Image (cartoon, coloured by chain):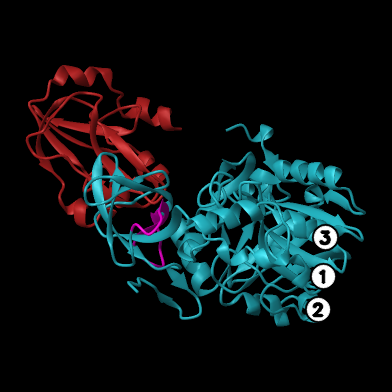
Amino acid sequence: MTYPENYRYTKDHEWVSIDGDTATIGISSFAQSELGEVVFVELPEVGTKVVQGKTLCVVESTKAASDVYAPVGGVVTAVNTALLEDPADLNNDPHQKGWLVKLGGVDVAELEKLMDAAAYSSHVD
Amino acid sequence: MDKTTLHHTPLSLVHEAAGAKMVDFAGWYLPIEYSSLREEHENVRSSAGIFDVSHMGEVRVAGPDATSFLEYVTCNHVARLDIGQAQYSAFLNDQGGVIDDIIVYREAADRYLICVNAANREIDVTWLKRIAEIRGGRFEIDDVSAFLGQIALQGPRAVEVIRCIPELRAADIESLKYFRFKSFVWQGVTCIAARTGYTGEDGIEFFVPQEVTSAFWDLLAANPLVTRCGLGARDTLRLEAGYPLHGHELKSTVLALESGLAWIVKFEKGEFIGREALLRARDQGLLHELIGFEVAGRGIVRHGDLLRDKHGEVRGEVTSGTLTPTVGRAIGMALTAASWVGLGDSVFADVRGRSIECRVVKLPFYTAVKRTKLANYG
C-alpha cells in the first residue's frame, strides 16, 4: 500500500492534506481495512470548532463505532455529505473520494507533530 | 494477543494458515472472519457454511442414577428424551438464574452427553461435581472436552454436502430428524452427527474426536457449496434467528423466565434447582422481559446501550445488537421492564450521547421456514 507523499498521518490512522490554511481529513487505507465495511458515518456541523487530538467525527462498521480524531485544529468548513447516504467511498477510496471533513483556519505548525508517508508506512507494517 | 497463551482447537492453526483473521475468544485462538462477515453470513443462508466450535465443552454423565441427577440439575424434562434425541436446556442456580445454556444428548438409557459453552465449562463441571457429592448417587461425571472437536455445518444446502461423503451416506445422516443424533465412523474413529444448529438454518453439528477434526474440516471445506465461517458471522446469524447468548441475554443474575427460556422450564417434571424461586417469581409477576427491536433511526444499537421511554426514563438495556446482512438493518434484543412496551412501539436507545429511535418487533427476526425477513408489528 502506498500512502500519498504530500499527506501527513497520525498514529491513530488519520491523514491530513493541506492547501494554504485549509485541511482535508480522512482515515487511512489501513484504518478502513481494520474497521471492515463502514455502514454509518457521523459528521460534525459546519462551523464547529475542533482542537487537535479531540474527536472530530465517528465512523461505524458492523464490528464497532470508531472515533476519528482531529489531526490538526481548525473550524469545520465542509463535510462529505455523500458518505451519509453511502459510505462505500470510505472503504474503496479512503485517501481521495472518502475524505471526511475540511477545516479552515488551520495552524500549519501543528503538522510538525505528524508522520510523513514513509514514517506512517513503517508504523503500519 | 499472544497466541501461545491461548487455548487452541485442533483447527486453530489451520485457520491461521488459511489467512483467517484470528482473535482471542474467551481465551481461545479462533477466527472472527475468514473472508468477510457479510459473505460468510449470506452463504450460510443461501448455500452452506462451516464453523469451528471445538472450544465448546462436552461432559458425559453416565450411570444408573444419571437420569435422576440430570433431572435435578437441569430445567428441561430429561426423562422424556428418546435414546438418540437431544434437547436444549439450562443449568439454573437456586435463584432461578442461568448458569449456562446447554444441549443434552441421550446416548443410552443412562448415558448422556452435555454440550456446554466454552466460557462456562470449568464453572459448570465444578458445580455439577459439587452437587453430585452432596446428593450422592451411582453415576460418573467426565469432562471429555479435550478429546472432542466440533464442527457445525449449516445452510439450506447442507444436505447436499452430506450426500457427498460416503460414511455419512452409509449412516443415513441425511434422514436425521430435528434434534436427533446418531454416531458414525469416519477414518476408523467414532463421531456423532446431530441435527442441531445455532443459525436458524438446517444443518448438522458434528462431534469429531480431535485426532481427525482437521481432516474432517478439510473434507467439508473442499466442497464448493461450503464457505468457511468465523465467529463474527456466527453471531449475526444467531441474532437474526433470535437465539440467546450466555453473557448477553442469559446470565446467572437474570431469571430464566425473564430471558426467553420459559419454553424449556418444565415445572411439572418435579424438583429441580431453581424451581421454587421461579414459581415464586412467576406467581408474584415477572419484573423483566426480553424484547426484540429494529433500529428506525441512523446507527447501530449495541450490547450495553440503555433504552429509554419517550420521557427519557431508562426502562431497559440492550443485550445484543448489530447490523445483520439478511434482515438488512440494525436489530437487537434487550432486557426491559415487564409489560413496558408492545409490538410496534417506539423506544429510544442511548448511543454515544445521541438518542436513536427503535421499534419493538417480534422474535425471531428471520426464519428459514418462510425464508422471509420478519419485521412484525403483531
Instruction: Quote the CA–CA distance across marks 2 and 1.
Output: 8 Å
Viewed as shown, does residue B134 lie left or right of B376? right
Chain A is shown in which shade?
Answer: red
Chain B is shown in which shade?
Answer: cyan
Q: Is residue B63 above or below residue B226?
A: above
Disc ID at residue B183: 1
For the residues labelled 2 and 1, say whether their Cβ atoms are less than 8 Å apart: yes
**CA neighbours of label 1 inside 10 A, class few (<14), some (14 to 19), many (20+):** some
State which chain disc 3 sits on.
B
For the residues labelled 1 and 3, say whether their Cβ atoms are less than 8 Å apart: no
Q: Is residue A81 above or below residue B282?
A: above
x then y, percent, for residue B142: 85, 49
Q: Is residue B66 magenta?
A: no
**CA neighbours of label 3 inside 10 A, class few (<14), some (14 to 19), many (20+):** some
Which residue is more in the foreground, B226 or B263? B263
Q: Is residue A16 above or below residue B349?
A: above
Pointer 2 or 1: first along the chain: 2
Q: Residue at x 27, y 18 (%)?
A: A113
**CA neighbours of label 2 inside 10 A, class few (<14), some (14 to 19), many (20+):** some
Residues shaded magenta:
B322-340
Mark 1 lies on a secondary structure that is strand
* In the rendered image, residues at marks 2 and 3 fall on the same chain: yes
Viewed as shown, does residue B241 lie left or right of A52? right
x then y, percent, for residue A72: 19, 25
Q: Residue at x 65, y 69 (%)?
A: B196
The kind of residue on which mark 2 rests is Ala
> Which of the 4 image quarters holds residue B205?
bottom right
Disc ID at residue B68: 3
The residue under label 2 is B171
* In the rendered image, residues at marks 2 and 1 fall on the same chain: yes
